[in-house]
Amino acid sequence: MNTAPASAPTSQKFSLADFINLSVAIAVIAMAGHFGMEYLFSDGGSANLRRDVAAVNEAIYFFRISGGDLSHARTPEEVIRLMQSVEKDPLTLKVHSILSSVAANPIFQSPAEAQMRAERAYWDAERMRFEISESGPRGIKAFGRPEKPASTSETHGVTNELHELAEQL
């Protein structure tokens, strides 16, 4: 039970040691938050690259089953150029859709970036697909997006044509 009268002040003063302990605790929490956010944002680029490589590999799959040949392609530029040269028809619609939204502008690493341990996409000519590695020769660090996003009507048109194609198969 509290024996102090209700009118008595119950204030305590912070000592210098209490102030230093509080300051250190706040600094540790701030540093943990800073490094945690830095880790999350640095991993975001990796996730985007992995997602884009998966999408481009899907376009390569559709390109190849529609009769496209990538056996002579040795560089990422050759692969994208060959895939963009295909005429638009129902079988290659998915290829053009993915290329226009994901792989239109590959962004290559600089020579200095290639020396560091960072994820990059490279063309594996034997497997005919893009792979991801953290070392090796200079590669693609990101796939650029087109300047102007596709309009809603174009997107719905692509979706409708894909559904029609699926029904035909």
Image (spheres, rainbow, N blue to C red):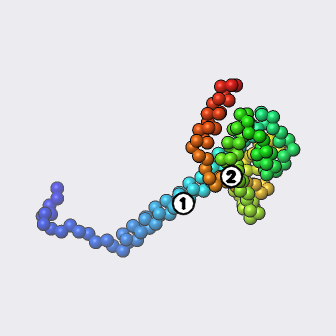
Q: How far across and down, in percent of the image, does residue 54 sit?
A: 68, 42
Q: Is residue 20 left or right of residue 97?
A: left
**Image vertical order of residue 36 relative to residue 9, above or below:** above
**Image vertical order of residue 139 relative to residue 12, above or below:** above
Which residue occupies the extreme right position in the image?
Answer: 72
Q: How far across and down, in percent of the image, does residue 4 sit?
A: 15, 63
Q: Is mark 2 on a helix, strand or loop?
A: strand
Which residue occupies the extreme top position in the image?
Answer: 168
The quadrant of the picture occupied by the N terminus is bottom left
Q: How far across and down, in percent of the image, does residue 93 sit?
A: 70, 38
Q: Nearest the camera: 43 or 25?
A: 43
Q: Nearest the camera: 38 or 50?
A: 50
Residue that appears at 43% across and 65% down? 26
Residue 79 makes an appearance in the image: no
Q: In this view, does 154 lie to the left or right of 3?
A: right
Residue 143 — which label?
2
